[in-house]
Image (cartoon, rainbow, N blue to C red):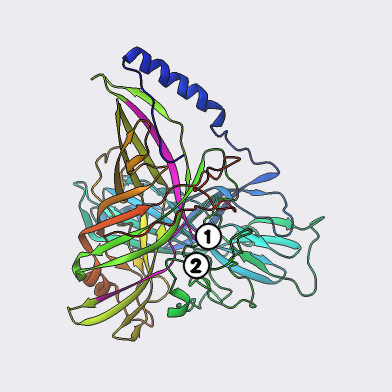
Amino acid sequence: MRGQRAALRPTRAHARGAAIAALVALAPLLPAAAVALGSHEVDAELPYLCTLPSGQQPATVRIKATVPDRVAVGEEVLPTGVGTTVELPAAATADLLALKAATVRAETLLTVAAGQNGQRTDLTWRGTAQPLAVPAEGPLVLTTTGDVPTLTTDSTGELTLTAEGFGVDLALSTADGAPTTPAALSVTCVPGQDTEGGGVLATVPVGAGAPTGGPSSPVPPSATPSSASPSSPLPTSPLPPSTAPRPPSPAESETAGGGDTAQDPAAGGTADSGPKVVAEPTPGTPAGPRPAPPCRNDKPTPTSLTAYITGYANVRKLNGASLVPVSCVLIEQGIPEIDFRPDGSIHLLQKSDAVLSHQGRKQSPPFKATFLTFDFMPATATMVLEQAGPMTVESDILLVFPDNIAQTWIRAPLVLRVLDVRVDGTRLDVGPSCRTEKPLSSPEPDPATYPGDHLVLLGKGQLLNGTDATGYVLTSGGPLTGEVTIPAFKGCGAGGENLDRLLTASISGPGNHLKQIQGQTCAVGVEVPTEGQCTEDRQPYVIPKPER
C-alpha cells in the first residue's frame, strides 16, 4: 500500500453507501481489547514525608498496577494500568494558595527498585495529569497515570519491586492562566518509617517452577523498557541512590545517521556489573550496518505500523539548526470513521496512537548539536527527546472527487533532556537530571480538545484516485512542519553549581521551526507485508533523509 486511496461515487447517496460498506469491510481487521491472563492487581497505600514550603508534611501515596503472576526466564515483566495518587495535607493547599495558584498540573516520579538474587536496578515510574483546580481548603489530591519500563531477567528466583523515593513536580498557574511566581514547585518525598512491608509492591516468581533464590552465580535482571508500552522514564545503573549515573562520552552518544549507541547514556555501569540495560540484537536483520536504529514491534496487531522519522529543528536564539536523528515510531491505527458534514462535505477521519521507541524506551536516540554561543564560542550538546505522555495522530481526509485532500496533526508531549555539554572543548557538567521543566509546546488549533503543553506537527497531502499520494499521508509518509517553544530548563548542574539560568538564557524561547520527514510505513501486523515497505525481519524498509 503506497498511500491511502478513496473510491468515490458522483452522488451523495452512493458515497454514503460506499463509506458504510468500507467500514463493514474493515471491521474484521480492528483490534480487540487485550485481556491480561495470569496477572494480579497491585494496590499499595504507603506513607511518605514530603518537603513543602511550609515544611515537612505527611502524605499518602497510593500505587496501582497489574503485574504477571509468574514469568519464565527471559520473559518480559511489564506492569500495566499504572496509576499513582498522592494526597498532600491541607498545608500543601495553603502553600499553593499563598502563591495565588488557581490550577496545578502534576508530574510524579516514583523510584522503584527491582531486585533479584542480591542484584538490583532502579527504575523511574513517571506519571502525568491534566490541570486540576486548586481547592479552596482541605487536602490536595493528585492522580497521575503513565507507562513504565519492562523488566527481563536471565536467572531464576523471585523478582521484587519495591517503592522507594517519590517526587511531585507542580506547574502552577493563576486564575487568568499566567504562571505564578515561582511557576513551579518540586516536592521531594521519602518513605515513612512505618511503611508496611518495606514498600514492596509485588513479587514475581521467575523460572520453571519459579523457585525462590537462584544459582550461585546468577545473571542479574535487565531493565529494558517495553516498546509495546513505551515510557519516558529511564532505568538507572546499579549505583547506590546517592550516586548519579556518569554522563556519556562522545563516542557513546554519537550515532551514525541516527543509529543506536553502544551503550545507553542513561544506563551507566558496565556490561558485567549488576542489573543493566540490554540492547537485544534484532533477529533476521541483514548483515552489515544499517543507517537507522532497530524499529520493531514484537507484539503487533493487524493495524500496527512502524516508520522512521528524521529532520531538523531550529534553535532561534543560537541562529542554527539541530539534526534530529532517524528515530523509530510505532503506530497503532484507530478505527476510521465517515463524517457527513452539514455543508455536504464528506470526511474520512482516523485517530491513531503513536510512540517513539529507542532501545525499548519512549524517546529518540541521543543526538548532538553544535552551535556558536555568543556568536563566537562553539558549544556542543548531546540531547534526547523523551515522550512524556500519549502521542496522537489525527487524520482528516476531505473526499472530493477526484482529489482527496488530507490533513494530519501529530501531537506529542516531548521533554528535551540534556546529557552532556562541552563549551570550546571543555566539559560543562550539567548533571544527570538536566531537562526542560515542561514539554515543548506549539500553537494548538484545538486547545479545548487538546489542553496542556505539547508539540504539534502538521502534514498536508493529496490522494488522487488511481495514483500514489503526494505530500504527507500517514501510511506513505512525507513532510511534517511546526513551530515550537522551548521551555526553561531545570535540574542542570552538579556539585552545587546551578546551570538552569545559563541554558534557559541560551536556548529557551519561542519561534523555533521544525521540519520532520516520515518514511513509508511498514504494515508489520499483516501476514504478508507489501514489497518495498518492510525488510525481511519486519522493520521499515524506507529510511527517510532530512530536509531543511
Residue indicated by mark 1: 294
As drawn, the label of residue 12 is: none
**Along the line of sight, which residue is nearer the eye, 365 or 499?**
365
Of pointers 1 and 2, the one earlier in the residue sequence: 2
Say if residue 81 shows up in the picture: yes
Q: Quadrant of residue 513?
A: bottom left
Q: Position of residue 508 (x, y in %)?
A: 24, 65
Residue 463 falls inside the magenta stretch: no
Left or right of 215? Residue 337 is left
**Along the line of sight, which residue is nearer the eye, 250 or 136?**
250
Looking at the image, which residue is at 34% across and 74% down?
A: 381
Looking at the image, which residue is at 70% across and 72% down?
A: 118
Q: Residues within 10 Å of mark 1 (few under 14, many from 20)?
A: many
Say if residue 249 shows up in the picture: no
Q: Position of residue 220 (x, y in %)?
A: 68, 69
Of the 4 image quadrants, the one containing the C terminus is bottom left
Check if mark 1's residue and mark 2's residue have beta carbons within 8 Å: yes
Residue indicated by mark 2: 260
Marks 1/2: CA–CA distance? 8 Å
125 vs 136: above or below: below
Q: Which residues are magenta?
A: 347-371
Q: Farthest residue to the front: give it.
A: 466
**Along the line of sight, which residue is nearer the eye, 530 or 134?**
530
**Badge 1 element:** loop
- Amino acid type of the residue tagged 2 in the rendering: Asp
Q: Quadrant of residue 180?
A: bottom left
- Amino acid type of the residue tagged 1 in the rendering: Pro
Looking at the image, which residue is at 36% across and 41% down?
A: 473
69 vs 268: above or below: above
